[in-house]
Amino acid sequence: MIGVFDSGHGGLTVFRALTARFPRLPFVYLGDHANVPYGDRPSDEVVALTRGGVEALFRRGCKLVLLGCNTATCVAARTLQQSWLAVSDISATPPGALPRTTEGMLCAARLPSTLPTITVTRSAARV
């Protein structure tokens, strides 16, 4: 199963594009509506919230988790890869494109039309 995580509902665009492109693959979507938006939150909070969402998707049996949230991608993805997840790769993925899956992989899926938020603008990370 492939998980798509977002801070709200914006990642549904990524989710829809992936399910249309790969209709035979099982997908699950998790939107953190309790904490949306992530954009004005401190970086450590964005990392913690993103970690919680990604953990939840892995517990549900996902082998691959895609970040559909621009803020989570720019602020948390690299930190999660380096300090928490046992993954072999992290990449930016446009909607409809899916990297070859490996066990426990975290990828970042970002729409070109996504506008940078305050937290993302403050961070040095850009995807």
Image (cartoon, grey):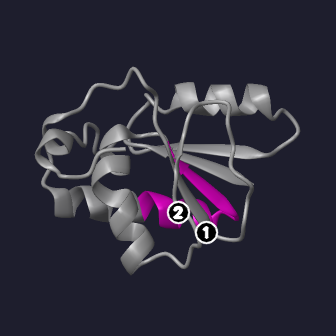
Are the residues at dot 2 and dot 1 in contact (C-beta closer than 8 Å)? Answer: yes
Q: Residue at x 66, y 26 (%)?
A: 17
Return the residue at label 2.
56
Specify few, some or many for label 1: CA neighbours under 10 Å numbering under 14, 14-19, or 20 or more: few
Q: How many marks?
A: 2
Q: Looking at the image, is 23 positioned above or below residue 104?
A: above
Quadrant (top left/top right/bottom left/bottom right) for the N terminus? bottom right
Query: Which amino acid type is shown beneath numbered disc 1?
Result: Arg
Range of magenta residues? 52-67
Query: Which amino acid type is shown beneath numbered disc 2?
Result: Ala
List the single residue furthest toward the right: 24
Residue 36 location (% of width, % of height): 29, 38
Return the residue at label 1.
59
Residue 104 location (% of width, % of height): 64, 70
- Left or right of 78? Residue 108 is right
Q: Residue at x 40, y 75 (%)?
A: 82
